[in-house]
Amino acid sequence: MTEDLLRELELLREFGFTHLDIHGTPALAGRPAEAGAPDLLDEFRQIVIACEKCRLSKSRTQVVYGVGNPNADLMFVGEAPGRDEDIQGEPFVGRAGQLLTDIIKAMHLTRDDVYIANVVKCRPPENRNPEQDELDACRPHIRRQVEIIQPRVIVTLGRFALQSLTEKAFAISDVRGKWLDYNGIRLMPTYHPAYLLRTPSAKKEVWEDMKKVMAELER
Ligand code: SF4
């Protein structure tokens, strides 16, 4: 049994699974490719990778723009790149990223089916929290990505992603697991995978949230 498979099975156990349907369930892939979104996302990437709108441009290795299916039905929005992401130029590739990948797999999806991006595109030094002016400066980028991709569902990961995308001071403890609306798109707030690494008992709550997301995508 491979290490990946073992890790996935362990995560499923933590989610509360007691048995597995080995026949699986149909994958919830993105929409068939539509003309426009891939080109628009690529064009927008050229603008964002040259961005110097806030102080984070001085300390970054590179802009971490986003990755995945330009026609995705499901979009994950996180906070900001960490050290691994800053080096590799891809969001969610460190330990928290591996956990997000495992969650996506447990949903019978792959990272290529969904789109993953952060509300802040450059790494805050020493992984500190993003500051308000940095969140404000970067907000138009994530909003434009959502506008281009037009997902059916957005999952925000943690407080900063939720508050910055919506520009509302939601407390994650009040709204986690409850459907919100973002410009006509269903938005499910849940915990950040980094929090799950510190608090494994919260994985069950996140899985409850992901079950709601899967049900919504199957409708
Ligand atoms: S964090 Fe966002 S606003 Fe700041 S420099 Fe990077 S891309 Fe520009």
Image (cartoon, rainbow, N blue to C red):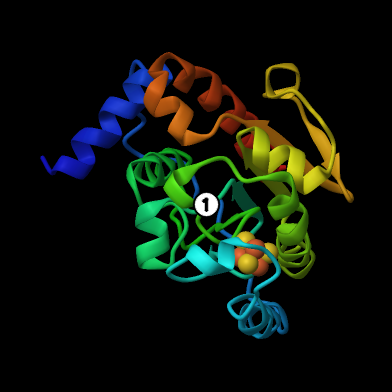
- Amino acid residing under circle 1: Pro
Q: Position of residue 166 (x, y in %)?
A: 82, 44
Q: In what quadrant of the picture does the C terminus appear?
A: top right
On screen, residue 14 above or below 130:
above
In-front residue for pair 193/130: 130
Q: As drawn, is 95 to the left or to the right of 114?
A: left
Q: Is residue 188 visible?
A: yes
Q: As drawn, is 86 to the left or to the right of 185?
A: left
Query: Which residue is at a point 50% across and 56% down the rendered structure image?
Result: 123
In-front residue for pair 180/1: 180
Q: Position of residue 174 (x, y in %)?
A: 75, 17
Tell me the element at label 1.
loop
Q: Is residue 31 visible?
A: no
| Quadrant where ligand 1 appears | bottom right
On screen, residue 186 above or below 46:
above
Query: Which residue is at a point 19% across and 34% down the rendered structure image?
Result: 6
Q: Position of residue 154 (x, y in %)?
A: 69, 47
The residue most toward the right is 183
Query: Which residue is at a point 58% across and 61% down the rendered structure image?
Result: 56
Task: Give neighbour class at mark 1: few <14, some 14-19, many 20+ (Cα, 10 Å).
Answer: many
Query: Which residue is at a point 24% across and 34% down the rendered structure image?
Result: 7
In-front residue for pair 21/10: 10
* Res 57 → quadrant: bottom right
The residue most toward the left is 1
In the picture of the structure, the residue carrying the numbered disc 1 is 124
* Res 191 → quadrant: top right
Give the tally of numbered discs: 1
Q: As drawn, is 62 to the left or to the right of 35?
A: left
Q: Position of residue 4 (x, y in %)?
A: 21, 43
